[in-house]
Amino acid sequence: MRVVSIVPSLTEAVAATAPGVLVAATDWCTHPADLDVPRIGGTKNPDVAAVVALAPDLVVANAEENRAPDLDALRAAGLAVHVTDIRTLDDSFTGLAAMLAACGLARPAWLDDAQAAWDAVAVPAARRRAVVPIWRRPWMAVGRDTFTGSVLARLGVDNALEDDPERYPRIDPAALPPHDLVVLPDEPYLFTADDGPEAFDAPSVLVSGRLLTWYGPSLVDAARLLPAALHP
């Protein structure tokens, strides 16, 4: 199989399972760090012509990360496209297994390890209520029906914006629902100790965006590291 991935987390999942399968990935595919394949643009603006020229057996994509017109153009060029739609923690285990199977790969040990690690997570008795910004200028945050929200819920943290009609609404830091925590990931916006916490009244924690928003081998570390970060 020759596979092109246009989603960073799927790139890591395929590379960790069978490194020689990938023939191209996006500019944002940073894991594994030693990945040496041609780059074909971003998740929102892949170079369709470059992907087609590689003649892959399969393109792996995601319903949220990638744009329908790009996926339609790849299909119109005769390429097979497997689209994941992962919105919950449980979705990640089944969706990744299905995606890897579409690549001709058996379920890998790291996926079993990830599921076992999450099964072992103890949910704290005292739940927290958080806002999760993902961008500023303008401010945006995690809203309803997201993988990030599902991960947080499993860790005893309820999303204060879970009932918002938008999945990633614009927000005003001075006019938010009640919350006792602000979770600031380092992607897609790189929040830091000096850029983000000062805009909110509630205590904040800085976390790895890869652990909070990616589904793949990072799920193992997410189960081990996020509980302590969110409940210090």
Image (cartoon, rainbow, N blue to C red):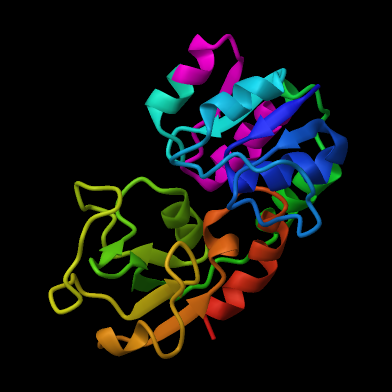
Relative to 63, residue 27 above or below: below
Residue 200 in view here: no
Above or below for 89 versus 59: below
What residue do we see at 43% from left, 77% from top? 191
Q: Where is residue 39 in the image (x, y as percent from the top left)?
A: 65, 43
Image quadrant containing the C terminus: bottom right
Is residue 180 found left or right of 112 in the rendered image? Answer: left
The residue located at (53%, 33%) in the rendering is: 47
Span shown in magenta: 73-100
Instruction: Answer with the quarter of the image where residue 153 lies.
Output: bottom left
Estimate the x, y position of residue 211 in percent, counting from the top left: 60, 63
Quarter of the figure with residue 69: top left
21, above or below 72, in the image: below
Q: Is residue 167 in view from this perspective?
A: yes
Instruction: Look at the image and tell me in which quarter the N terminus lies.
Output: top right
Q: Residue at x 52, y 19 (%)?
A: 74
Q: In front: 23, or 209?
A: 23
Q: x and y percent of residue 181 in the render?
A: 36, 79
For the point 72% across and 17% down, the residue is 57
Which of the 4 image quarters holds residue 64?
top left
